[in-house]
Structure formats: C-alpha cells, structure tokens
Image: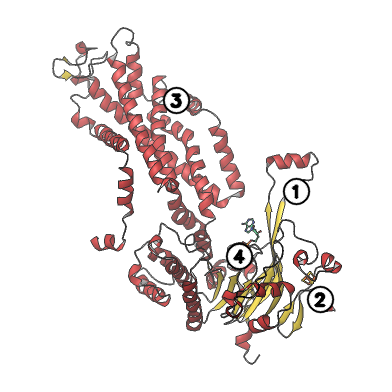
Amino acid sequence: MAAAVQDDGINPWRTFASDFAEKKLAVLGLIVFVALIAAAIFAPWITPQNPYDLNQIDFLDGRLEPGSVGSQITYWLGTDDQGRDLLSGIFYGLRTSLAVGAASTLIALVLGGALGLFAAYFGGRVDTLIMRIADLQLSFPAILIALILVSALGQGVDKVIISLVAVQWAYYARTIRGTALVERRKEYVEAATCLAISHRRIVFKHLMPNCTPPLIVVGTVQVAHAISLEATLSFLGIGVPITEPSLGLLIKNGFDYMLSGDYWVSFYPGLALLITIVSINLVGDQLRDVLNPRLKK
Amino acid sequence: MSNQEQNSPVLEIRSLSKKFVKPLDFAGKIAQKLGSNIREEVVHAVDGVSLHVNKGEVVSLVGESGCGKSTLGRMVAGIMPPTSGEILYKGQNIASLTGEDAREVALKVQMIFQDPFASLNPRLRVRDIIGEAPLVHKLTTAAEQDDYLDDVMLRCGLDPSYKRRYPHQFSGGQRQRLGIARALAVQPDFIVCDEAVAALDVSIQAQILNLFIKLREDLDLTYLFISHDLGVVEHISDRIVIMYLGRVVESAPTEELFAKPNHPYTQALLREIPRLDARHADFTPIEGEIPSPLDPPQGCHFHPRCPFATDRCRQEVPQLKSVAPGHMSACHLNEG
Ligand SMILES: Nc1ncnc2c1ncn2[C@@H]1O[C@H](COP(=O)(O)OP(=O)(O)O)[C@@H](O)[C@H]1O
Ligand code: SF4
Ligand SMILES: [Mg+2]
C-alpha cells in the first residue's frame, strides 16, 4: 500500500507521534507503561516462580529480606509470609490489576460512549433521562458507589468489573455528549440526513469518529482511576479473591507486617501500583495536549 | 405558457412556517410559577411562506442574514420538519409519503451548504463522502462504485485520482465541488444551494456559479438558490424572491425586479449592490438595524426602517399582491 500512503500526502499518525514525542517525560511514561503491560502479559514465562503453584513455594522461606537466597532461587524483592517470591507476585498482581482496569474501562467506554452519543443526537427525553442518571451518579464519590455495589454483588473479578463499569460510564457519557452536541450541529450531519442515511449510520459512522479524541484522553486517565479503585476495594478486602490477587491485595497482605519492620512485603507492590498510575497519567496528560486542537500552534 | 411540462412546478411551498421554541430552564419555570411574566423564547424563523419553482428554473431567495432563508432551505431539503404548512414535490405532499416513496423523494431534493469545511466529514475519505449514499441506496454496487464515482467527480471538475484523500487536503473551491459531487451522486433533480459560494474568493465564486449553470444544462436540474447578496444571483436566476424577517415581501422575474423593484426593501437592497458604473456614487446602506426576530415589529416588519412608513404600516400586515404579471409585492403603498 505504498502508493496509498503517498497519495494521502500527510500521514496523520506520523504527525501525531512526533507531537506526542515532544514531551520526554510522556515518552518515558509510555515506555514504562508498555513495559508493565508486557510484564503482566508474559508473567507466566518470565517470573522466577509461579507464586500460586504450591509445589514451587517453600513455606520455610517466609518473609525473607530482599536479596535473600532461597532454596531454589534468589528473592530479589524478598518474600511474603507464605514464602512466595514477591517479584513474581507483583508481576502476577499487575496482571490482575491491569486486566481489571482495562476491561472495566473498555466496557464503560463503549457503554457510556454509546449512551452519550444517543443522548446528544436524539436530544429531548432520551437526553434528559440519560444525563439525569449520569449527573446523579457523578454527584456521589466513585469509591462510595463501588463499595456499595461490590458489597451487594459479592466478591469476584467479574463483580469488581461490573461495579467499576457502573461507576465509570457516566464520565464517558458526559464527555462524548459535550463533543457530540457541537458536532451534531455541523453541516456534514445535515448533509447525511439529507442523503437519507439512517440514524444508526449517522451516529456510528459520522458522529462517533469525530467525538472520540476527548474520549481517548478520558479513557487513559480512567484506566489509572479504575486500577486505583480496584486496589482500594481489594485493600479493604472486598475486591478480587485471594486466588487472583491484584496489587491492592498484595499491599493488604503485607500491611500487617509493616510495623514489625518487614516493610517490603507491602512496599514493593505499593511502589509498582504507584509507578503504574503515574506512567498512565503521564501518557494521558500528553494525549490530552496533543489531541486538543486549541493548544496546537 | 406554451409548454405544460416546462411550467409545472417541481417544488411548491404552501404557507410554510417554522417556529423555534427555546424551552424555559428550571429557574425560568419556577419564576413563571411564581407569577413572573417570563415566557419561552419563540423565534418565528419562517412565517407563512408560499412559493413555487418550475422545472428547469433557477429561483433565488434573497434577504439579509437571519431572515430565515437557511431554515426554509433545510425544510425543503427534508433536514428539519416544518411547524406548519406544506411542501409539495411534483404535486405530492412530502409529509404524506412513507417508506420507499419518502426515501425516493428525499434523494431527489438535495442541498449544497455554505461552509466548505463544516459540510464535509473530516474523518472520511472522498470516496466515502461521495460514495456512501449511492451505495447505501443501491444506486451503484461495490464493484461498479469506482466508475460511478469517477463519473460524478469528473462532472464536478474533480480529479478522480483524489478519491483516497481527506477533505483537509483540498482548497475551499475544491471542497465546494466535493459537496456538489456528494449531492449529485444520488441523482437529484432539485437542488437547494444555501449561500453555496458566499464563503469563497470572488474568482472562485464565478467558477462554482458556472459549474451550477453547466450542471443544470447537463442534468436538467432545478435550483432554489439562497443568497444574502442580490449581485451574486443576478446573472443566474430566472426569478428572485425577496424575504424579510421570515416573510416574502416581493417576487418577480429577475430583469423586472432589477428594472422595476416595487417594495421599498427591495429598492434598498438594490442600492446596496456596488455597481461598476457607480463606483464613486454615494453608497447608502439600509438605514437602521435588522429588528430582533424574537420580537418582530407589528404590522409590516419593515416599517422601522422604511422611509415611506405610515400609521397603517405600523398596524396592518401588508399582503402579497400582484403588481404586474408574475410580479408580487407586499406593501401598502400599492393600494393608493
Ligand atoms: N436550530 C435553530 N434553533 C433555534 N433558532 C434557530 C435555529 N436555526 C435558525 N434559528 C433562528 O432562526 C432565524 C433564521 O435563521 P436562518 O434560517 O439561519 O437565517 P438566514 O439563513 O437567513 O441567515 C434566526 O433568528 C436564527 O437565530
Ligand atoms: S408596507 Fe409600509 S412600511 Fe412596509 S414597506 Fe410598504 S410602505 Fe414601507
Ligand atoms: Mg443562512
């Protein structure tokens, strides 16, 4: 398709990439974030041990300091009270945290995005109904709603995701509605109406692609928000189950030993969580600047 | 009146009206309940307009900005429904059609827009902008789409090899040609041009106007041409309809309107056109501001700016009456 690229003149992706790369900190954030995703995906192949396989764990290695040499491997970040390698535990925890964050964000984005688009395009009662619910929900703290939902639904990764989706869809609905209300009045939408294009096609083929840039920005930042919400729930013991611990649950498990001096059991998972959230926010902030045409020179 | 076919209206509008109501917000509703005389804001954008366009004719709708021209055009093009009144396409009331018939008529009436940037979806390639509707409505097939598009693009003076480009890669004039190609791609026979050249450079305006004339001959098109500038439409119109604050005030064949304008508003508009032969003459713009459409003047809408206004003008709405064959005007002066 070399001819096609030439035909297009400017390649919008290349412009986008070079704009993004202007801020070095954002590039660093992106590199770290990609590395974390890789670590999470490939955890089973790269970690020194599978911390949830009882055959690989030596219970006698419980709460060893970082750098200790165990019976089979070196524990670079120490071990927890069960004798699990903390580095391996963090990689596996990252897996759960990122998966929950990404899944809930994706579902909330699609759901909230579609509802916000419908609200803006059809207006009237549809709009009032959808946006009243969204406003009501946004007037309560997210963690409060998540807490109530999780305690009502019970424990489990799926329940946590449902709660996070319920908390987050309103952000997307509100964001996309604002953009869509402006886009909907543009003449290209009138032209499509005049050409007897169906509502469904106008909403998804014409309106949606013009409303997604701000949604991507909100989505990136919301991944971080979802991950920290999930960590909070798990820290409180009502999030993901013990069989699939996330970073939040690892922090909770080590928290009891903080005061007795075995800081690492809680500290390293906490550090991993912090790095994850900061790197996502760096990427999100730069995306907002690059995708916001008003800030462009 | 020799040829029946030539003189049958393609489009007829009967006392068409459009009101925009801005509903009260929550605070306003409470104030109203408490006895305040706050009311919903109502703009009577189009107020009982009747007109017809015969086959092959170019009728221009002229008036200052805000007088309701675009709103009328949108209703004709089926983009928004009228509040009251009828639109007839070849004798059939558009509102009474459903299903396949409604779609067919909808495609026969197309619109060209003013803004060459906002009127093209920036995320679509040219082939999708022009080619979507004919494909959706099965006027062509995926296999034949390329040839179909080449044909339409060539007709509009566009290079068919630009099919994979995005709108931002074109100039204003070319973008307007894209808008025209998009409309022509569904084989319409009536076209509403809403200030279609107003946003373009003067040299390019002429090219696009010439394209409209050529397309009319090639494809047997009929036009409703909307403009705020009488000078722009002078050479392409068969008839001109003058609007003021939602109402038609005068309509006449172009030559007659320029030679013997009847309505004081039309006379004022004509004085505004800069003439080559009168470049150094006094330029007298119409006195006064356009009144707010939210609160239009009683009687003749034009009376606050009319040098001939009388008490009757301030109270009674003048009706459109024939002042010469094919020439209508709404002014009390015509009744002696
Ligand atoms: N969608 C709308 N909602 C509310 N008011 C409108 C809308 N469209 C047009 N108007 C109002 O109707 C009047 C006529 O507008 P328009 O038809 O755009 O005039 P023109 O095209 O002659 O400049 C204006 O006062 C305008 O503010
Ligand atoms: S009716 Fe009266 S105010 Fe209106 S244009 Fe005629 S003379 Fe002027
Ligand atoms: Mg207009």
**Amino acid type of the residue tagged 3 in the rendering:** Gly
Q: Examine the rendering and report whether any part of residue B13 can be seen.
A: no
Q: SS at mark 1?
A: loop
**Residue B1: quadrant of the picture:** bottom right
* Cβ atoms under marks 3 and 2 closer than 8 Å: no
- B127 sits left or right of B260 in the view: left
Same subunit under labels 1 and 2?
Answer: yes
Residue sitting at x 57%, y 76%: B223
What residue is drawn where x is 68% and y is 83%?
Answer: B259
Q: Nearer the viewer, mark 4 or mark 3?
A: 4
Q: Depth check: A189 or A149 in front?
A: A189
Residue identified by numbered label 3: A154
Determine if the C-beta at disc 4 is less than 8 A from ligand 1.
yes
Q: Is residue A218 left or right of residue A12?
A: right
Residues under labels 1 and 3: Cα distance? 52 Å
State the separation of the CA atoms marked 1 and 2.
Answer: 35 Å
User: Mark 1 = which residue?
Assistant: B39
